[in-house]
C-alpha cells in the first residue's frame, strides 16, 4: 500500500511539473487548486508621527479585492484613523492602530 501511495505521489508530482502553461509565463490554475491565498499584512510595524506634521496612510499587502478593512485606534486622544486607513496624530503620546481584514468569501 505504501509503495502505491509513493508511486501515485511521484506521478502527480511529475504531472504537475510537466504541465504546459497555456500562455508563456502562465501557470495552470489546476496546480494551485486548494492552495490558500497569501495572508494580508500591514507594510510597517511602527511609525513615529509628529503633532502638526503629516498624516500617514496605512498600506495592506496581499489584500483580496473583496476584503473589508477596519482600522481602530487604541487612544483617539493621541491618534485618529479614518475608515480609509489614514492616521492623524492629535497629541503627544503612544497609541496603537489595529487593522482588521475580513474576506467576504470566508464570511
Image: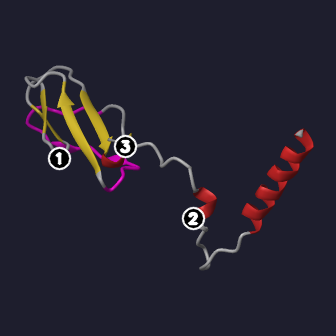
Residue shown at 48%/47% (left/top)? 38
The x and y percentages for residue 69 are: 25, 43
Taking the image as shown, residue 8 lies to the left or right of residue 102, namely: right
Taking the image as shown, residue 40 lies to the left or right of residue 89, namely: right
| Magenta residues (range) | 47-65
Magenta span dominant secondary structure: loop
Residue named by callout 3: 106
How far, Cα to Cα, is label 3 from label 1? 22 Å
How far, Cα to Cα, is label 2 from label 1? 33 Å
Element marked by disc 2: helix
Verify whether residue 80 appears in magenta. Answer: no
Q: Please, is residue 28 above or below residue 84 in the view?
A: below
Residues at discs 3 and 1 in contact (Cβ within 8 Å): no
Residue shown at 30%/47% (left/top)? 104
- Within 10 Å of disc 3 (Cα), the crowding (few <14, some 14-19, many 20+) is few
Residue named by callout 2: 29
Residue named by callout 1: 84
Amino acid at each position: 500500500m505504501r509503495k502505491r501511495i509513493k508511486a501515485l505521489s511521484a506521478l502527480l508530482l511529475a504531472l504537475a511539473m510537466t504541465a504546459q502553461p497555456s500562455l508563456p509565463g502562465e501557470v495552470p490554475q489546476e496546480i494551485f487548486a486548494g492552495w490558500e491565498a497569501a495572508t494580508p499584512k500591514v507594510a510597517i510595524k511602527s511609525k513615529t508621527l509628529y503633532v502638526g506634521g503629516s498624516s500617514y496612510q496605512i498600506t495592506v499587502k496581499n489584500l483580496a479585492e473583496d476584503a473589508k478593512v477596519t482600522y481602530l485606534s487604541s487612544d483617539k486622544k493621541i491618534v485618529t484613523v479614518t475608515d480609509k486607513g489614514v492616521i492623524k496624530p492629535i497629541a503627544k503620546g503612544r497609541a496603537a492602530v489595529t487593522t482588521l481584514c475580513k474576506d467576504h468569501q470566508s464570511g
